[in-house]
Amino acid sequence: MPRCVLTYTYTDGEITEDADDLSVLDGDVLAYLPEHLASLTFGLEKPAAWSALMSVSHTGNMCIDNSCDRPGEVTTFKRTSDYVVADVVATYQVNSDMEVYAKVNNVFDDQEIVSRSPAGARPNQPRTGYLGMKVRF
């Protein structure tokens, strides 16, 4: 059976009141909260037998601190990159109590800056593969 699931989240979060120490101001954005998140999962599956699925996810860029969008602020190095990552997974149901799987995260090994703290730019997870089994008892 074909399977296709699309999800999307739009977030417009902001600070609504100045802090006493003025570290955050009314209208400041929330740090590390992307405005757009989307995911599409598609593939084939036969329930209780096998599946082969790919998931493609988009994460919009994010401010790394609350002052990112303040007028007059220098925004260089105050945002993460927006990025798309694809993952694949295949499963096979050996019997009612055991399933084996193979999974690859970041299939195309795309590298983007997803965080800038602590201590500078941090990339997303590189291509990573997994083999495993799930046993129910």
Image (tube, helix red, strand yellow):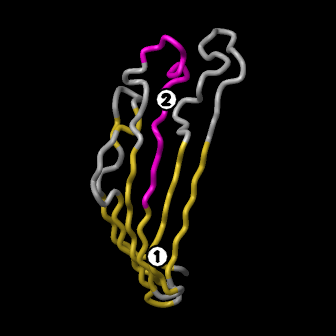
Region of the chain picked out in magenta, as a range? 56-74
Q: Is the magenta stretch mostly helix, strand or loop?
A: loop
Q: Identify the secondary structure beneath mark 2.
A: loop
**Residue placed under numbered mark 2 in the picture:** 63
How far apart in space, not on screen, are marks 2 and 1 (Cα)?
39 Å
Nearer to the camera, 14 or 50: 14
**Residue placed under numbered mark 1 in the picture:** 134
Q: Does the magenta segment cover residue 92?
A: no
Q: Identify the secondary structure beneath mark 1.
A: strand
Left or right: residue 133 compared with residue 108: right
- Of labels 2 and 1, earlier in sequence is 2
Q: Viewer-nearest of labels 2 and 1?
A: 2
Q: Does the magenta segment cover residue 70?
A: yes
Residue 53 percent across, percent down from the top left: 43, 72
Residue 19 percent across, percent down from the top left: 68, 14
Q: Residues within 10 Å of mark 2 (few under 14, many from 20)?
A: many
Name the image quarter holding residue 111: top left
Residue at x 31%, y 60% (from the top left corner): 107
Residue at x 61%, y 17% (from the top left corner): 24
Q: Residue 107 carries which label?
A: none
Name above or below for residue 71 compared with residue 85: above
Residue at x 35%, y 73% (from the top left corner): 102
Amino acid found under the numbered disc labelled 2: Cys
Left or right: residue 103 compared with residue 64: left
Name above or below for residue 85 compared with residue 41: above
Name above or below for residue 23 compared with residue 95: above
Residue 74 percent across, percent down from the top left: 42, 15
Query: Which quarter of the rendered picture does the C terminus lie within?
Result: bottom right
Residue 67 percent across, percent down from the top left: 53, 19
